Image (cartoon, grey):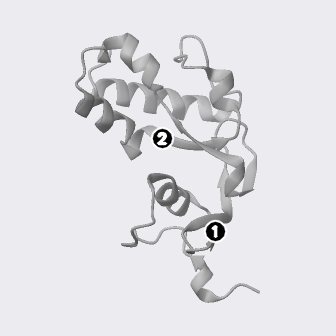
């Protein structure tokens, strides 16, 4: 049985633990149900409820998810980011607004392609994906 300290609400503010990576924060923030924490230090999100925007399927195990940038870094570099400093690259890579949680393996299929070459297989996610992709490209002044 889970103790109350093992559960974190899906929309709670970010806790101030040193163990919280960007992935951890994303898993907690985007879960549709309370998450269960585990691991030796209690810092690992083990389960919750997420919808994979690329398939439309619900996923309960955090280990079945990847953090995927809506705009792949390799695409960004080819479309205006090649001259970015290492700091600008880091800011882009760590921007939580550019990432989605998706089912494992989609990044391999997508392989750094943009919307002119690849769209999410789940039709209802395509419009949102395109809107986010364009907004991120504008934010970082990338050629579309």
The quadrant holding residue 83 is top left
Mark 1 secondary-structure assignment: loop
- Of helix, strand and loop, which one carries label 2? strand
x 60%, y 64%: residue? 45
Q: Note whether residue 144 is visible.
A: no
To which residue does mark 1 refer? Answer: 33
x then y, percent, for residue 34: 61, 72
The one nearer the camera, 135 or 36, is: 36
Q: Residue 134, how many percent across, how many down?
A: 40, 25
- Please name the residue shown 61% across and 17% down the image: 118
For residue 56, above or below residue 31: above
Dot 2: within a 10 Å radius of its alpha carbon, few (fewer than 14), some, or many (20 or more) residues? some
Residue extending farthest front? 40
Residue 12 lies in what quarter of the image?
Answer: bottom left
Left or right: residue 64 compared with residue 81: right
Q: Quick check: marks 2 and 1 in contact, CB under 8 Å?
A: no
| In-image side of 8 versus 105 (left or right) | left
123 left or right, relative to 131: right
Vertical arrangement, residue 34 with respect to residue 136, above or below: below
Label 1 crowd bin: few (<14), some (14–19), many (20+), radius 10 Å? some
Mark number, residue 53? none
Left or right: 73 as drawn, with respect to 105 = left
The span from disc 2 to disc 1 (Cα, nearest Å) is: 20 Å
Q: Which residue is mark 2?
A: 99
* The N terminus: image quadrant: bottom right
Mark in the foreground, 2 or 1: 2
Q: Is residue 52 above or below residue 116?
A: below
């Amino acid at each position: 049985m889970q103790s109350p300290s093992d559960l974190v609400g899906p929309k709670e503010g970010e806790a101030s633990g040193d163990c919280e990576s960007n992935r951890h924060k994303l898993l907690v923030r985007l879960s549709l149900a309370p998450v269960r924490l585990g691991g030796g230090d209690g810092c690992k999100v083990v389960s919750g409820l997420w919808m994979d925007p690329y398939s439309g399927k619900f996923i309960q195990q955090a280990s079945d998810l990847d953090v995927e940038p809506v705009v792949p870094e390799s695409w960004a570099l080819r479309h205006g980011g090649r001259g970015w400093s290492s700091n600008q690259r880091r800011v882009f890579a760590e921007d939580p607004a550019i990432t989605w949680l998706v089912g494992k393996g989609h990044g391999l299929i997508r392989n750094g392609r943009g919307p002119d070459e690849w769209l999410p297989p789940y039709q209802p996610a395509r419009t949102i994906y395109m809107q986010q992709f364009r907004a991120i490209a504008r934010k970082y002044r990338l050629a579309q």
